[in-house]
Image (cartoon, grey):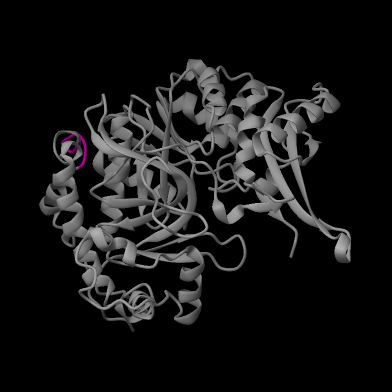
Amino acid sequence: MNTNAPRYYWQQVDWESLMRDYPPPPLFEKTTGRLSADEMRALQNDRFMARMAEAWKVPFYRDRWTEAGLEPGDVRSLDDIERIPAFTSDDLKEAIEAAPPFGSHQPVTADDLAERPIRILTSGGTTGLPRVTLFDQHSMEIQGIQTARALYAQGLRAGDIIQITYTNSLANAAWCAYQGAYHWLGAVPLTTGSGVVTPSERQLQIARAWGTTAWWTRGEYLARLAQVAAETGVDLPALGTRGLHTHIGPDIDGHLRRRLEDAWNAPVFDNYGSHEIGPISFECRARDRKHVSEDTVFVEICDIDTGETLPNGSRGNVVATSLYRSLPPIIRYNMRDIMILYDREACECGLQTHKLSTFLGRSDEMVKLRGTNVYPLACQNAVSRDPRTTGEFLCVVSHEGEGLARREKFVVRIERRSNSVDAKALHDDMAASLHRDLGVRVDVEIAEPGSLSEFTGLGLQNKVRRLLDLRQ
């Protein structure tokens, strides 16, 4: 029998210290969010060095860093961060396989679970078991504060009802929104979950009946809800939505944003984050790129091929270091998300931060097609631009031919909005648009409305899949 005495969660958090060190809104906009560049750098440096000291005790980091020729004391400040080798999610999977169940990167064993409150959340899991990440009370509350800052900067206030269509499951996105709204804003979280939990038509019925004023969901699902509203006679603008808080993806020219705002008669606010670190950047009411939450994360942009840190204004992989996570430490995590980091500046909202661009794609999903790098997410711009589509697409990569004649086949399947849309005309126009955007010709297939959801997972899960790789 387990005789461990209960440890009450509320007693495990020094709330005053937490709020002082990581101010929630509206304190953030009056304090940490307005620090000068030198003041912010000093704060980041202190937190970075504390995380480094913790990480040296963790086998995952100690072994990697020693192999790279580093010793404790070699990294004396943030100025030395480029000496540290970056890692990817593949390295985390290997760490878990080598030291189950939690991995050599997480300083907790199954025997330690009674020592402090621990949450198990996961990322991935398309094949095999999902990648586990542990969260203690400190990291759970700070990612709630990160989310609350974003929602507040986007206009959410106490008493607002925010409908969360990410499922409160093993994935992290819904929990970020729930804690941000409930713990740190006084807003009302309405946790309807994804379409597999609450069908889309019911989502709209609930919003109308209970007075939803804001949504936290993916851009693709907002488009799906708009389509269902049109099919079922729901007047979306009449719902009175005041904000669409989302992860809009690679909407480079803003076509998806405009389509959503026209349908909902409400502003769209873009956000960016990761399962392990929580919200990293967010748009404010000015919607002029995304503020980096600089007291919680240090962001670099690195060359996709060489890993070299690039100057601000360059396009490359996001490499992030959490300045608050100790369980586990996250030091130079190459998330393989392609973005641009801009110089620090004062925004009209009052915050002074670096900013990140819109999401531009994932480098680990790159397909080499006739000598050209093709990123599946880059198809979103052309597809969402054309009103004859539902905005849904799936890139299917396979091999055709044998021996020396074997080559990669890249097909973009695109849903037409209705059966009345001329499939041939849409096919030809999409082929031309994708050629312009991608720089290489790809095959196009026109699919019927709703037919791709079983492959993309739209409305059924928290993430939407855009690449189906049949090469292996």
- The magenta-colored residue range is 24-28
Q: How many marks?
A: 0
Q: Quadrant of the C terminus?
A: bottom right
Query: Which one is in front, 193 or 368?
Result: 368
In the foreground, 336 or 83: 83
Q: Position of residue 148 (x, y in %)?
A: 29, 40
Where is residue 417 drawn, in percent x and y?
A: 72, 26
In the image shown, does 401 or 212 lie closer to the viewer?
Answer: 401
Residue shown at the point (60%, 43%) measured from the top left:
377
Look at the image and say whether residue 42 sits in the magenta stretch. no
List x then y, in percent, for residue 466: 64, 46
Q: Is residue 283 visible?
A: yes
Residue at screen point 45% across, 59% down: 307
Query: Where does the N terminus fall, quadrant-wise?
Result: bottom left
**In-image side of 125 versus 28 (left or right):** right
Q: Is residue 363 left or right of residue 352?
A: right
- Horizontal placement of 204 versus 322: left or right? right
Q: Is 232 positioned to the left or the right of 425 in the image? A: left
Up-down relation of residue 169 to residue 192 (above or below): below
Instruction: Answer with the quarter of the image where residue 426 lies.
Output: top right
Expressed as whole percent of the image width and height from the top left, the position of residue 372 reads 68, 48
Q: Residue at x 53, y 18 (%)?
A: 262
Secondary structure mostly taken by the magenta-highlighted segment of the chain: loop
Dividing the picture into quadrants, the one containing residue 263 is: top right
Q: Assess whether residue 27 is covered by the magenta stretch.
A: yes
